[in-house]
Image (cartoon, rainbow, N blue to C red):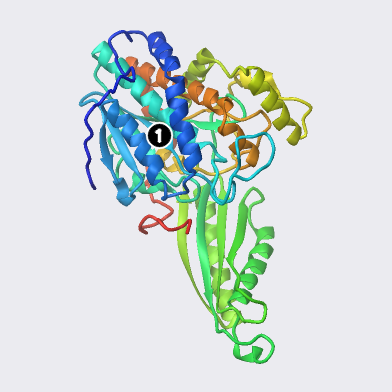
């Protein structure tokens, strides 16, 4: 593991701490830095680097934290774009998670109509805002610790490749959270909410079939189609859907199926996800998928291998922490649109089948709930099994917007996204300060975490012992 220590070059950016005795002072100081952090977020939005390729995005956040006086440790867990940034030498360790990877095929200009920005990825899940808000919060907490001469360590985790690459799983497996007391995260979204979260366990792999090339018209009998192997596997998996739990999810894309119809393809690849809200169910489904692939290869006269790409646990809630974060999000409040933002939001809303944008949802805090239905997966799940973990979401998109859409990319490139980002930064800051001020809350969260794990729990990563899948987006 490489270590790189940056000096604290404050460069006149206002990273002073002497006046920030109270949390309200910290929030006021954060507000004055809105333009500064918005510029960082929009630089990352423009870079739009995909999982494990986020060299410039990671470097920008590292530089920002180093300039604020954090000790940077680079290339953690064997991942070039993963890092940690820490301030403090003693006291509780509070982790703040940050992400910065984009999604393929979702390039979009920051305008309220669908228009590609070129052949590149897009921040359709708002991770440019995620990483920047978490960075802003870590720096704000550091300044508060200094101003109040408080003991405590705040540690930012630069987490790459959340979108299918399971970056945090490798970080958990490497023991990087072993000394952490509490971990916090947030996520961009279409509303402000800090209810108990949920996420599906997930295991993914690329199945590769190998056959024999031949002329598809003159000598098809001499060929063995790798694409036949893929399609046979897909047929069996689709029949298997009737015989798995109804709330399980299986989805795939054929990533390689041959180059010309008149050539029997000797190579084909299909990329699969299996999901459920219990990791044991996911592991069983995945094992059955492997058997289907083996059978497909046998039946088509091809051979097959597979590469596990990602694997995540479900999300373990912690209500002791969740109530506290909801309270702080309520204190901060939601997003207020100005006239320019409202015009943009109304135009986006029409593309979502709405007459106008729902300003009330953007400005309000959703009612607190203790349960949630999972709709996707996140590698934060593995963190939540390692340490008490809590998260929330803010309205960085026009209400009604779905994640992984061009509308999410567009709003994330505007001041609408920036405003939601600063709501998140302030909520994280208040919550971490409260944890440092209330050791009993940390103890209660740890007690609840242990009770949810159970006495016989042993962490086993779904990725096994494979090295990070650094090329999964290639």
| Residue at image coords 47%, 27% | 38
Res 315 visible: no
| The quadrant where residue 125 appears | top right
- 422 horizontally vs 17: left or right: right
How dense is the environment of label 1, judged by Cα within 10 Å: few (below 14), some, or many (20 and up)?
Answer: many
- 387 horizontally vs 307: left or right: left
- 147 horizontally vs 197: left or right: left
| The quadrant where residue 407 appears | top right
| Residue at image coords 38%, 55% | 468
* Position of 1 relative to 325 (above/below): below
Q: In the image, residue 367 lies at what x, y percent?
A: 61, 20
Q: How many marks?
A: 1
- 305 or 447, which lies in front? 305
- 203 or 2, which lies in front? 2
Q: In the image, residue 289 lies at what x, y percent?
A: 56, 64
Res 145 visible: yes
Instruction: Name the residue tied to disc 1.
Output: 97
Name the element at disc 1. strand
| Residue at image coords 59%, 78% | 265
* Position of 113 relative to 303 (above/below): above
Q: In the image, residue 44 lies at what x, y percent?
A: 46, 38
């Amino acid at each position: 593991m490489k270590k790189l220590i940056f000096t604290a070059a404050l460069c006149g950016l206002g990273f002073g701490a002497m006046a920030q005795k109270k949390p309200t002072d910290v929030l006021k100081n954060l507000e004055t830095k809105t333009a500064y952090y918005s510029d960082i977020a929009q630089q990352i939005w423009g870079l739009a680097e995909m999982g494990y390729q986020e060299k410039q995005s990671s470097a920008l956040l590292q530089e920002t934290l180093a300039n604020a006086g954090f000790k940077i440790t680079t290339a953690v867990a064997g991942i070039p774009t993963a890092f940690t940034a820490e301030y403090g030498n003693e006291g509780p360790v509070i982790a703040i998670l940050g992400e910065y990877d984009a999604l393929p095929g979702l390039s979009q200009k920051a305008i309220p109509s669908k228009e590609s920005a070129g052949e590149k990825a897009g921040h359709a899940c708002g991770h440019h805002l995620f990483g920047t808000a978490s960075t802003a919060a870590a720096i704000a907490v550091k300044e508060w610790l200094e101003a109040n001469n408080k003991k405590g360590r705040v540690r930012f985790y630069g987490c790459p490749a959340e979108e299918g690459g399971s970056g945090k799983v490798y970080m958990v497996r490497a023991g990087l959270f072993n000394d952490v007391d509490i971990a916090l995260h947030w996520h961009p979204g279409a509303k402000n909410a800090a209810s108990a979260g949920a996420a599906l366990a997930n295991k993914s792999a690329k199945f590769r079939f190998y056959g024999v090339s031949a002329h598809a018209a003159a000598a098809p009998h001499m060929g063995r189609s790798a694409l036949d192997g893929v399609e046979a596997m897909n047929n069996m998996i689709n029949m298997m859907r009737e015989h798995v739990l109804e709330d399980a999810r299986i989805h795939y894309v054929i990533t390689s199926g041959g180059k010309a119809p008149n050539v029997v393809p000797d190579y084909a690849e299909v990329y699969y996800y299996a999901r459920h809200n219990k990791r044991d169910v996911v592991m069983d489904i995945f094992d059955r998928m492997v058997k289907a692939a083996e059978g497909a290869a046998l039946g088509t006269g091809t051979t097959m291998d597979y590469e596990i790409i990602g694997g995540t646990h479900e999300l373990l809630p912690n209500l002791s922490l969740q109530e506290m974060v909801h309270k702080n999000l309520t204190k901060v409040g939601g997003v207020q649109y100005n006239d320019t933002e409202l015009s943009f939001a109304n135009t986006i809303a029409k593309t979502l089948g709405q007459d106008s944008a729902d300003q009330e949802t953007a400005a309000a805090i959703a009612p607190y709930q203790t349960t949630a239905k999972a709709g996707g997966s996140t590698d934060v799940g593995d963190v939540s099994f390692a340490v008490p973990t809590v998260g929330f979401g803010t309205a960085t998109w026009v209400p009604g917007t779905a994640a992984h859409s061009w509308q999410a990319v567009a709003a994330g490139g505007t001041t609408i996204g920036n405003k939601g980002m600063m709501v998140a930064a302030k909520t994280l800051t208040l919550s971490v300060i409260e944890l440092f001020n209330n050791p009993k809350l940390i103890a209660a969260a740890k007690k609840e975490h242990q009770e949810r794990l159970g006495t016989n729990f042993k962490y086993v990563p779904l990725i096994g012992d494979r090295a990070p899948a650094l090329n999964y987006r290639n």
